Image: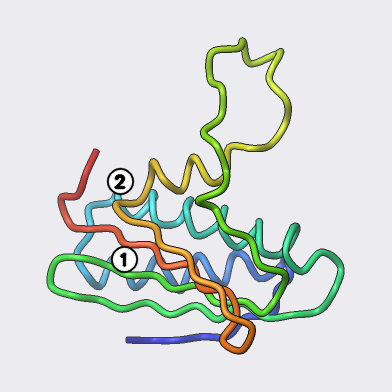
Amino acid sequence: MRTVIFPAHFDQLDAIRRFVTQAARDVGLAEKDVCAVEMAVDEACSNIIEHAYRSSKGVIECTCECADDALTVVLRDYAAPFDPANVPPPDLSDDLEERKIGGLGVYLMRQLMDEIHYETDATTGNVLTMVKRRGGEE
C-alpha cells in the first residue's frame, strides 16, 4: 500500500495520474484497464478540486493498494461532502449538440471501474474507494 498527499490543484493531476498508473501496472492490469483507472481517478480528482474544494486550499490523499487480482484506489479529501450515489444516470438519448455540458463524471467512473464506494465523516473526511480487477468487467 502506498499513499501520497497531493495539493488539490489542477496542476497536480499529471502527478496523480503517474502515481496511479504505476500502481495499476504493478498489479498487472491490462493497458486498457490502466487507462480506465487513469480516467476514473482523473475525473474524481477533477471533481474534488472543482466542486468540493472550489477555490479553497486543500489536499487529496491518494492511496493505492495492490492485491493479487485488483487495484484499489482510495481518494480522501476534507472538503464539502458529496455522495456520488445521489447522482442520477445521465440521459444519453439526446444528440451530443443538445446535451448540457458536464454531468458525466460519476457515470464514467461507474463505467470504468468495477466497484465504487463513498463514505463521509466529519473527522476522517470524504473517502472515495474505487476498485479495478484484473480481467474485470467490460
Mark 2 surroundings: few (<14), some (14-19) or many (≥20) residues within 10 A: few
Q: Is residue 80 left or right of residue 135?
A: right
The x, y position of residue 35, in whole percent, is 39, 50
Residue 99 shown left or right of residue 70 in the figure: right
Q: Position of residue 67 (x, y in %)?
A: 19, 75
Q: Is residue 90 above or below residue 11?
A: above
Amino acid under label 1?
A: Ala
Q: Nearer the viewer, residue 107 or 45?
A: 107
Q: Classify 10 Å Cα crowding around label 1: few (below 14), some (14-19), many (20 and above).
A: many
Residue at the spot x=45%, y=86% of the render?
3
Residue 58 numbered mark, or none: none
Which quarter of the figure has residue 34?
bottom left
Q: Identify the secondary structure beneath mark 1.
A: helix
Q: Residue at x 64, y 37 (%)?
A: 103
Image: 115 above or below 98:
below
> Which residue was labeled with disc 2?
32
Quarter of the image that includes the N terminus: bottom left
Q: Identity of the amino acid at label 2?
A: Lys
Query: Answer yes or no: do the residues labelled 1 and 2 have beta carbons within 8 Å?
Result: no
Residue, disc 1: 24
Q: Quadrant of the C terminus?
A: top left
Q: Residue furthest right?
A: 55
Picture residue at 55% right of the left edge, 57% below the top: 42
User: In this picture, is 28 found above or below 2?
Assistant: above
Distance from disc 1 to disc 2, alpha carbons, whole Å, reads 11 Å
Please tell me which residue is depicted at 54% across the width and 53% down the height of the picture.
84
**Circle 2 sits in a helix, a strand or a loop, which is it?**
helix
Answer left or right for 39 relative to 113.
right
| Residue 23 x %, y % | 33, 72
**Residue 102 location, quadrant:** top right
